[in-house]
Amino acid sequence: MTISSSWSSKDIPNLRGKTALITGGNKGLGFQSVLELSKKGAKVIISCRDVESGLRAKIKIMTEVPDAEVEVIPLDLTDVISIRNFSETVKQNLDRLDILLCNAGVVNLDTRQLTKNGDEMHMATNHFGHFALTGLLLPLIIAADNSRIVLVSSLAYKSGAINFNDLNWDDREYSTFKCYGDSKLANLLFVKHLNQFLKAKGASTIAVSAHPGLTGTERQQSIGIGGKMAKWIASPVGKGVLPQLLAAIDPQAEPNDFYGPKYGLVGKPVKLKLNRLDKQDAVKLWELSEKNTGVVFG
């Protein structure tokens, strides 16, 4: 389909019979994604660390969409045991998964933080966690015809340059923005190699990515890239969510497509051109991620 200049969430087709899983679906862009997909009849699973927050999000959605099918399941993307337990719960309740929207993430942490496993927090949450989750849920995803995996990245990927010898910033001066950019570049490298894997498997599933631009979420207005500027020029969440929604349902999507606002930070959702991604880095990151998480694809 040609993306109309007036494309909005109202143009999402009927999704009754489809199931979507959204990480970080309890607030911000994740919550808005759950709401919009629920309005179109999809069954949606919210994953988040704070179950109470997830349940409050479910109540809000049910108030607006009384017949919505929404389930809340706890998930900590920095903990492989939590990811495995979550995945087993999902597998027990589903036989297929049509949309996996990897939306959750941490942004621009002021100081270097490590997970209990010793991994730098941006890379652990934004990449390793979603890598492991995707690998464990892949049988369900492949079981659905023309299913979709969406990684929510950022234009900050352009600042990324993954140092495979110092992923945790032990030997370098910590840089908030570059650390975040590395994790967002990792999202795109993952998508690139994941599509090669899916093609080799003969799956109808494809992986794509999206970025929201500058959006008026609480996170972007406080610690995000835009900071205070976001309060003045940011798109409302209802518009900022459109690229990842379009990425999730566009029937003309192709492997490695990248969706975002037309004018970079703001604008209608369109397909954007990515900077060249290094194939060797994609393979190296994949192998490192399997080793780090213990999740081996295929």
Image (cartoon, grey):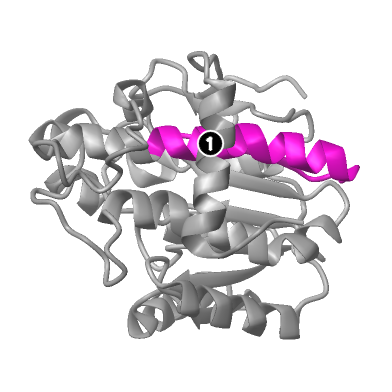
Q: Locate residue 226, reporting x and y percent.
A: 18, 33
Name the residue: 33% across, 24% down: 265
232 or 129: nearer the eye? 129
- The stretch of residues the image draws in magenta is 184-212
- Residue pointed to by mark 1: 284
Image height check: is 6 above or below 143? above
214 or 7: nearer the eye? 214
Q: Locate residue 70, reporting x and y percent.
A: 59, 76
Image height check: is 67 above or below 290? below
Q: Locate residue 24, reporting x and y percent.
A: 42, 63
In which image quadrant can residue 198 be found?
A: top right
Amino acid tagged 1: Lys
Name the residue: 39% across, 15% down: 263
Name the residue: 60% across, 63% down: 295
Q: In this view, does 221 lie to the left or right of 150?
A: left
Judged by its main secondary structure, the magenta piece is helix
In which image quadrant can residue 290 be found?
A: bottom right
Q: Locate residue 57, reporting x and y percent.
A: 41, 74
Image height check: is 221 above or below 61? above
Name the residue: 63% across, 26% down: 257
Residue 253 on the magenta segment: no
